[in-house]
Amino acid sequence: MMKFFQNLGRSLMLPVAVLPAAAILMGIGYWIDPTGWGEGNVIAAFLIKAGSSIIDNMSILFAVGVALGMSKDKDGSAALSGLVAFLVITTLLSEGTVGMLLSTDAVNPAFGKIENQFIGIISGLIAAAMYNRFSHVQLPDALAFFSGKRLVPIMTAATMLIASALLFFVWPIIFTGLVNFGEGISKLGAVGAGLYGFFNRLLIPTGLHHALNSVFWFDVAGIDDIKKFWASEGVKGITGRYQAGFFPIMMFGLPAAALAMYHTAKTKRKKQAASLMLAAGFASFFTGVTEPLEFAFMFLAPALYVVHAALTGLSLFVAATFQWTAGFGFSAGFVDYFLSLRIPIANLPFMLLVQGLGFAVLYYVLFRFLIVKFDLKTPGREDDEDIVEGEEGDATGNRFTNMAAKIYEGLGGDANVTAVDHCTTRLRLEVKDMDAVDQAKIKGTGVPGINIVGPQSIQVIVGTNVQFVYDEIKKIRK
């Protein structure tokens, strides 16, 4: 099960890598026009819409990324099938379609929130499963055009019909249950704020946090925390309690966690970890968009994510207990914090900075200790691989072509190799007969090592240039 989540986490790295840039674009646009959100400034509108085109469609990116990453061949038809899966289920369970099926306009509000990360991940997993199962199926001659990879999107669409039928009944129950749960904990004062913060983060991987947020931030149960804060209505020190505790986490805690993950990354992976952690950490601090950072480790190290959720709950509890309040219109980053200082109902907002510094230390110490103590597979530590620095050079040159040819020959060629895949630094191969593998010939190419992991499974450790060797082997295979 842990291996499954680690593979899922790696699959999400491709779409997650683009999110920080989108978040920063939106943050700058919101900074330029904080009240009109682009209505009063064309540059702000351009930046906000450019960023939101990615952030708002994160579920689609996840569907495509998971389908591609979890498929055995990392083939484009798997990614296409992920998109097909997502489009089928979100169209069938949209408010308009459900209203038509039920012949009513009174549709459960759950169907208005069907385009979420949970649905995206489910779509990607189903598409990958269909690819792994049907990509090599041969149909009768009359249907031969639809054989193999062309069959995958068709089978994916058919499977999503069944998934949609199940979720038609299950989804409203889940959504409504969360709303009722939120209304219940809202009566518990500061403790309720803490519980809300904990479950808010815990539900981020599924996108179901939106149901919980609607209770506290909007007018589902009469709290309407965001609107009342910015209108400076309500009770000073109380209004804003469901927002304030997020500032220490997003501006200080998560960036500190990013620093801890960078410091604990393997030496040969620090540059790669630094690029992701720096961009994601800055996006969290400046804009309050945390998904790029959270999705970078939530599936690779789920236990660490639970710790993050607990710390978020603690932050909201502390802020609510001392009645330190600030609010946001976009998210709990520096932009919204700075703007909320001028709102009269904000109460001792500068204390949130003090709290944030404390949580930065807490996050850094806890994350670093837990990562090292339990060898958690955060970015830069996946698979405990022996990373080596490869030579820099032209990826299209003869170096990788020659290396790939010798490795493939050492593996036994087409007569022995049944499957080829790769991860961050390793070729992952399946062979018919391990005795036919010439390890000396493979090692003669200069690779750092070979790892036999099963009777027919072997890994060749190449280094960070493994993709180029893999591409050349794919050209060689018949």
Image (cartoon, grey):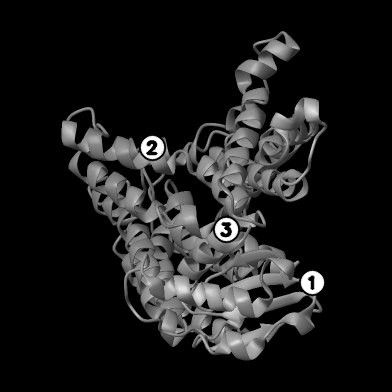
Residue identified by numbered label 2: 53
Q: In terms of sequence position, does the residue under pointer 1 or pointer 3 come before the other?
A: 3
Residue type at mark 1 is: Lys
Could one spot residue 378 in this view of the protein? Answer: no
Q: Which of these two is toward me, 302 or 33?
A: 302
Disc 2 crowd rating (10 Å Cα; few below 14, some 14-19, many 20+) is few
The residue lying toward the viewer, choosing from 331 and 2, is: 2
Q: Amino acid at mark 2?
A: Ser
Dot 3: few (<14), some (14–19), or many (≥20) neighbours within 10 Å? many
- For the residue labelled by badge 3, is the local secondary structure a helix, a strand or a loop? helix
Q: CA distance from mark 1 to mark 3?
A: 28 Å
Residue at 74% x, 72% y: name it: 431
Residue type, mark 3 in image: Ser
Is residue 468 toward the left or the right of residue 142 in the image? Answer: left
Instruction: Point out residue 337 in the picture as x, y percentages from the top left corner.
Output: 30, 54
Q: Is residue 455 left or right of residue 98?
A: right
Please give the residue where the numbered disc 1 appears in the rendered image.
432
**Disc 3: which residue:** 11
Badge number at residue 264: none
Q: Horizontal placement of 71 versus 141: left or right?
A: left
Q: Secondary structure at mark 2?
A: helix
- Where disc 1 sits, the SS reads loop
